[in-house]
Structure formats: C-alpha cells, structure tokens
Image (tube, grey):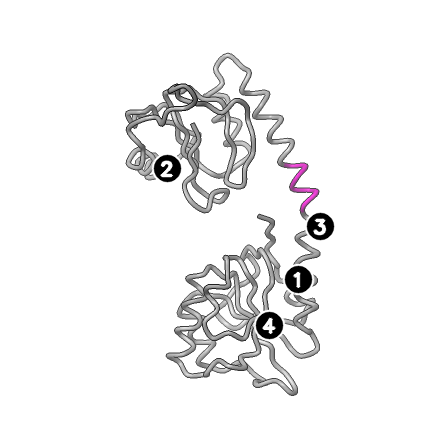
Amino acid sequence: MRTFAPGRSWIRGNRANVEPGDDASHREVTSAHVSELTSPGDWLRGGELLMTVGLLLPMRLPDCRAYVSECATAGVAALALGLGHGLPYQECPEPLRRAARESGVPLLTVPDETPFIAVTKWVFETIARREPRELQTALEINRTLSAVATRSAPLAALLSAWSEVSATPCVVCDVAGRLVGATPATPPAVIDAAQERWPRRVPPGPAGRSSTASRCTRSARGFRWPTSPLARTWISGPEARRPYWSR
C-alpha cells in the first residue's frame, strides 16, 4: 500500500491549519476521502485523510466523541473540516476540536479557497510519484537478500541484511518455539511475543512434506526467504499491519 506523510510544508501550501495540540505532519496517508456520513467507519480502510464540512454532524460533544472515536477505530490518518463562506462553519467548533484531541486524531481545518478536490488530487499525485522510487528500493532490497541467501550461513546473514534495510524486528524459531535467531537489537518483548504465538506443528505441504519458500520474494507484509522446514519466521512492525508468518 502506497503512503506518504504530508509534512508541514504541504499543510501550509494548501492553506490548511492544524488545530492546537495536533500534529498531522508525520501521519502516513494512504488516500483522501470526502464523506458527510455521521458514521463512516464501514467505508474506511485505514490511513485516510477524511474530509468533511460537518453538514450532518451535530456539534455536540457526545456526538463528536462518537464520530471521532469511530474514525480513530477505523484508522484514519487525520480529519479535515472545511470552513468558509456558504459552509456550515466558519471556524472549528470546540466540541469537534476537543473530541479529536481526546482521541488523538489530528484535526485540520481547510479554508474555502482550497477545495477538497484539490486536496484529493494532490494526495493521489504524491502517492503516484512515490511508486517508481519505492519499487526501485524494493528491487534493490530483493536482490540483496537473494544474494545473501546463497551464502554458506544464510540465516545469520539474512537477519543481518534485513536489519540493515528495515527497522522491523525478525524472529526465527523452530517448531517447538525455541529461538533459532533474531535480528540484532531485537527487543526481548518481541522475541517473547513470537515464541508465545508460535504454532507447535508445521502444516504439511504437497505430498505431506513441509513446504518452504523457494526464493526470496517481497509481499505487502514483508519478505519471505528460504528457511529450514523445521523453522518459521515471524515479522511484526512498520512493514506488517499484523504479525506476518512465513515458512
């Protein structure tokens, strides 16, 4: 999934304002979405810059809390309230500001000279520009890990190489849940979590044999590389929205 952090320069360039106590400049944005629904959670997938003019949202604290809480649970990156002439609000209502602050969801206000369509277009153009650069980076990482996997001691070399290209910890255990290896400086809590979640058997592959990844590949949740059929790899962190297993 392609993302970007808008940064303060973008916020200023689009004449948007960040409400006091909030910071949207480092939130990862996956898309921009406009909705006037008062319960938008079912239509969100996480990472959205969700824009609204507050047309249907009652600006009472309980209603604002329920709205912002649902958006936070859905994983929105930030909320943006459109302000200006002909719109319901010319300044940010205090109940919405307070609810956003309590939920930890950044709240931006967008003046009427910056239409929502301009924000949406800029978000998707920025994500599109990043794709070739990220693809090149992914290919370079793939080549590095593939080369390392052919060495005489691939596991230790792979863990070391992985730690150089990713901040995500990687833990390898055998089928009994015993630690086989981990990336340098992996926190003990991550190792403990991996061992606690470890399945105690290896699901059979074709013809009843345990299957292994045939080559190093990149997926949306991380990398897979050849490992012993008696070991599994657990990756969890920025590259994985949930624990990622490969065998």
Q: Using the numbered discs, state the Cα–Cα distance from disc 1 to disc 4 in whole angstroms.
A: 11 Å
Give the quadrant of residue 73. Answer: bottom left
Label 4 packing within 10 angstroms: few (<14), some (14-19), many (20+)? some
Q: Check disc 3 and report the residue beneath it.
A: 129
Residue 187 is marked as: 2
Q: Which sits earlier in the primary sequence, circle 2 or circle 1? A: 1
Are the residues tagged 4 and 3 within 8 Å (C-beta)?
Answer: no
Q: Is residue 8 left or right of residue 107?
A: right
Q: Using the numbered discs, state the Cα–Cα distance from disc 4 to disc 3 in whole angstroms.
A: 25 Å
Q: Which sits earlier in the primary sequence, circle 2 or circle 3? A: 3
Are the residues tagged 1 and 4 within 8 Å (C-beta)?
Answer: no
| Closer to us: 20 or 142 | 142
> Looking at numbered disc 1 in the image, what kind of residue is underneath it?
Ser
> Looking at numbered disc 2 in the image, what kind of residue is underneath it?
Pro
Q: Is residue 118 left or right of residue 21?
A: right
Q: Which residues are magenta?
A: 131-137
Q: Check disc 1 and report the residue beneath it.
A: 9
The residue shown at (44%, 31%) is 246
Label 2 packing within 10 angstroms: few (<14), some (14-19), many (20+)? few
Q: Check disc 4 and report the residue beneath it.
A: 17
Q: Using the numbered discs, state the Cα–Cα distance from disc 1 to disc 3 in whole angstroms.
A: 17 Å
* Horizontal and vertical percent position of residue 227: 45, 22
